[in-house]
Amino acid sequence: MNANLKPASAPPLLDVAHARKTFPRGDGNELLVLEDVSLKVAPGEIVGLLGRSGSGKSTLLRLIAGLSEPSGGDVRYLGQPVSGPAEGISMVFQSFALFPWLTVYENVALGLEALHVPKDEIRTRSLAAIDLIGLDGFESAYPRELSGGMRQRVGFARALVVHPNILLMDEPFSALDVLTAENLRTDFLDLWADGKMPIKGVILVTHNIEEAVQMCDRILVFASNPGRIVTSIDVAIPRPRDRLDPAFAALVERIYVEMTAKPGRGVAARTERAAGSGIDTVLPRVSSNLLSGLIETVAAQPFGGKADLPEIASELQLEIDDLFPVAESLQMLRFADVEGGDLRLTADGLAFADASSDERKRVFARHLLAQVPLAAHIRRVLDERASHAAPKSRFLDELEDHMAPEAAEQTIRAIVSWARYAEAFAYDDETGMFSLENPT
Amino acid sequence: MSDCGAPSRFDLIALLLVVGLLTFLAAGSRGVLAPLTTIEASPVTLDPAHLPEYAARSTLRMLAGMVLSLLFTFTYATWAAKSPRAGRILIPLLDVLQSVPILAFISVTFVFFMSLTPGRVLGAEFAAIFGIFTSQAWNMAFSFYQSLRTVPVELEEAARSFRLSAWARFWRLEVPFAMPPLIWNMMMSMSGGWFFVVASEAITVGDKTVTLPGMGAYIALAIEAKSLAAVGWAIGTMLVVIIIYDQLLFRPLVAWADRFRFEQEPGTVPPRSWVLEALGKSLLVARFLRFLRRTWRQLGAAFQAAPGLPRLESPEHSRRLDFVATLVVACLLALAIWHTATFLAPELSWHDIGYSVGLGAITMIRVFVLIGLASLVWVPIGVWIGLRPNIARIAQPLAQFMAAFPTNLVYPVVVAVVVNWHLSPNIWLSPLMILGTQWYILFNVIAGASSMPGEMRHVATNLRVTGWLWWRRVALPAVFPFYVTGALTASGGSWNAAIAAEVASWGNDRVEAAGLGAYIADATVAGDFHRIVLGVVTMSLFVLVINRALWRPLYYYAERKFRLS
């Protein structure tokens, strides 16, 4: 299909211009999740939306699918504004979203039934789609009888059977194990390369950098708070792509650098900016075990205190959604510097790695109170009061002046977890009270 | 600040709650030990000023029933779960007991308890409380039994490896693990319970009528006096009572039991209760709880002394015990059959049996038609509500509340209409049977629709599945398992309600629909114990057979095929 591409002058398959999306918040204000996003998809293109969770990429996908409406800007498919689900755009979901009460065949046929296609045609087209995706023999099986990989194949067959022009994929491989995901990706790319699928363009949402490099012609890197596109990277590596190819590794490295760029741009910008300022930083929920674990790993050989993020990621089998928050927390606590895709431990970070359990707690407490304004603030309030106690709601209210209620709740939980490890102050969840007492 | 040791406003709230409870206990239990004549001397009156007292008394009976039910649950279900041999008998027995229409049995137990404490109010109170107990206990025991059987193996092994005694294991592991489903079932039991409180407070057997001061007696008097105003007062009072009950007892319990949930799903909002929060912040309450805990530990120490390691039986010994148990059960069974036969045979002919089965069939048709009609109305509405989280948040507790409301308070209103307009009782009394139980269908369907994953709904939208195709392929299958649970509960409740709903009176006017419920009700009024027993046995068999032949297979089918995992 992509062998006979349309000339470049033809209108793009999809044209998103200055789209923005806000959600109403409990307090009457609005939460901005997507800010001024523009993108075009040309025929024959696989476009990747790469970013961490909460960067609005799935929200953008749902705007394109017509499952929700943009708050500003517009989405055009073949020159026509998208209002509601459009014929010719179909979607593959992260959780497969198969109907458990329908067989493989019935799940696939459902989309055609909705289009009022004649019975005979439903049958031939459904069987063809099942056949194409490698599911022949499984027509009468129920989803619960299938493995995860097979279920997602049904998801693909169901999306393809309606002969869409654009296929939207919302992290379609992230719920699968590594081997199955790789198997499904290569099968999909083979079908795409052979032009066997009826689709003209693909948008792939992912948080896996290597997956994006392997599959996409163009990668749009997203940043969070609010979700926005920070950069667009063309992938010029010839297909089929080999992960061991130096060009492949170099591009992965480049994207890591891009995503950990210094202030002004990049994903880490937010944390960096906030480290010195007030209590308005949203803290990630990262357990102290993960922090210690990463420090130990980087301090040990072969890294010896400085590590390449892609290398750690593959060594520890961590995806960016798992790795970046840990790295950023270390940076915030001044145990490490993250720059240019590298993580380098500070002197205190190295000292932490060598310390005994009790010393670690002391070092951690010192850094927590010195580098995290919220921790210092809570400690100060507790010190000042005669009772040495204060309710959580007091701090929650303060935080909610700066952030969404869910983010405030998450930040409090994060600070509680770190403070408990550091024994900086105590918290009783039953009564919702912070105090300086140690639990009896 | 509230946290520095001085009494706080939370202490005040807690204190007020405790004082209120004590006053309520004292007012409610006054006169229980008095002879029956005092009831006759100070009869129930229609003066609304007495309604708070009547409501308090009814509520106290309800609480007493609940305490009994909990005792029963902790002993019976534990025994059944711990001893496979006992479980083989106890569990089917529980299943049968669940099918017996309790309302019909009140008359029998009433006579029994009155004979235990002749001439005292206590007997009638016992009978009423026992009736309430029987309407609450079975599903609680079932839920507890199921929980005990499904305690995660690793927790069980951890408890054993730390050599916890059986007593400690029960309170530290098994009871906490069973708590959330048990509390949910207590709530369901309460919902059913109110109906029986109202029904059991004015009991007439033959020429003996005893009215216990309470909401049920008040409504009975209102019917006799044809006072719609009094009926209105009763309905209003009941609404208030259920709200208070919900806020002061169940919401705190549910919020408290949330900590025992084994798995916390992310994204769900934990239940909250202002009462629990007030009590939790009160230092006086904390001190009192510490005292209770200490006492409990000392009490437990006595039991802890005994090591809880399981006795090992030799296979031969075990076989012999099995044989003895089977023999005992067989003897009891033979005795029961012989006893029933000799009791019924001389008085009843085959014709009587055929007649009661025929009436049973009529009631059965009525129940099915009503369940069908209620489903047609509530399934679409439930789906519509369930897909809108903002509306579901309001509608869900409302539907649960409606299910708890004892609809027999509303019966007189309908009966007055039927009598006045000379409507056919065979048709117009029927809706009464489902008045209170239809809500089970509604709130289960709402729960089903709102538990549908977002991505699955997006698929349907993305593929542009709409109209009847959407109902057939998406919505109805998604709520089906939930619907079956609701319909099953509604059906069971409707059979019970038939006894109260197929016969109704308004002043001196009496309307009656043909059916097994009316048959039992008539036999009760006539004091004809042979026919009461025949009616109860027939109805139990109907319920049992319908459950086994229809609802249970349907339930397993739905669980297997439609449940979203």
Image (spheres, coloured by chain):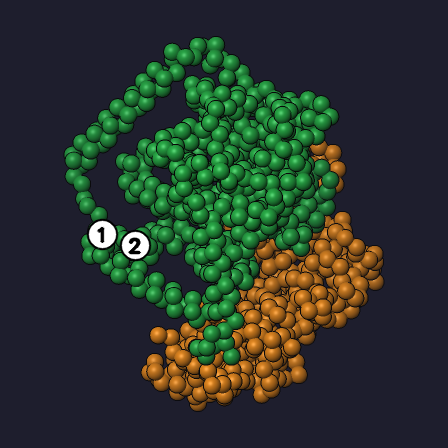
Chain colours: A orange, B green
Q: Which mark is residue B308?
A: 1
**Amino acid type, label 1:** Gly
> Would you name the residue on which mark 2 appears?
B169
Establish if A53 lies above or below B97: below
Q: Relative to B557, is B338 on the left or the right? A: left
Task: Identify the subunit bearing mark 2.
Answer: B
Q: Is residue B153 visible?
A: yes
Q: Residue at x 53, y 48 (%)?
A: B53
Quarter of image, res A254: bottom right
Task: Identify the subunit bearing mark 1.
Answer: B
Between B190 and A366, which is closer to the camera in this rendering? B190
Counting every numbered tag in the picture gives 2
Image spot of residue B318 (x, y percent): 19, 35
Q: Earlier in the sequence, mark 1 or mark 2?
A: 2
Mark 2 crowd level (few <14, some 14–19, many ≥20, 10 Å Cα): some
Q: Are marks 1 and 2 in contact (CB under 8 Å)?
A: yes
